[in-house]
Image (spheres, helix red, strand yellow):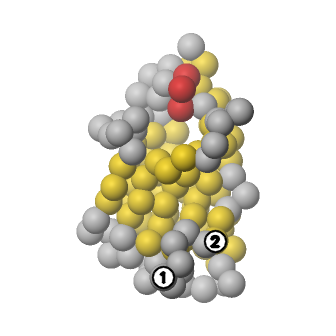
Amino acid sequence: QVQLVEAGGGSVQTGGSLRLSCAASGRTLRSATMGWFRQAPGKEREFVVGISWSGGTTRYADAVKGRFTISRDNAKNTVYLQMNSLKPEDTAVYYCAAAIGSSGFNSWGQGTQVTVSS
């Protein structure tokens, strides 16, 4: 079983930046696809970005393309999300997720709040 712990959330103004991190413990994530999701108040959880085990392939939701960057450091068992040019509509709880095995994203962190004010 893997435990995922997010950090780095906070409150910023429009146009600001934040860097989220997701540290894993319990097992290595070297073979796992990792992702970030978010859930805004009153809305369903949505996919933000994913990264392959090697880091060679990434996929971004259209809403964040060009502003967010995902990266991973397998030696540190950590995934990062650099968020630039933040907008109020980016306000949400951000969740880190791991796809271990072949059943999709099946391990989740507890989430970290990101609030962007206008």
* Furthest-left residue in this view: 56
Q: Is residue 36 left or right of residue 112?
A: left
Q: Which residue is mark 1?
A: 102
Residue 115: x %, y % from top left: 64, 30
Q: Which residue is mark 2?
A: 107
Question: Tag 1's secondary structure?
Answer: loop
Between tags 1 and 2, which lies in front? 1
Residue 6: x %, y % from top left: 64, 57
* Furthest-top residue in this view: 118
Give the distance between the C-alpha atoms of the residues marked 1 and 2, in whole angstroms.
Answer: 12 Å
**What is the quadrant of the N terminus in the image?**
bottom right
Residue type pointed to by label 1: Ser
Residue 33: x %, y % from top left: 44, 72
- Tell me: residue 20, above or below residue 57: above
Report crowding for label 2: few under 14, some 14 to 19, many 20 or more residues within 10 A (C-alpha). Answer: some
Report crowding for label 1: few under 14, some 14 to 19, many 20 or more residues within 10 A (C-alpha). Answer: few
Toward which corner of the image does residue 83 lie, by quadrant?
A: top left
Q: Are marks 1 and 2 in contact (CB under 8 Å)?
A: no
Residue type pointed to by label 2: Ser
Q: Is residue 68 left or right of residue 56?
A: right
Residue at (57% x, 64% y) in the render: 97
Residue at (50% x, 20% y) in the render: 14
Question: Tag 2's secondary structure?
Answer: strand
- Tell me: residue 66, above or below residue 24: above
Q: Is residue 15 left or right of residue 91?
A: left
Residue 31 visible in this rendered orientation of the protein: yes
The residue lying toward the viewer, choosing from 73 and 47, is 47
Residue at (69% x, 52% y) in the render: 111
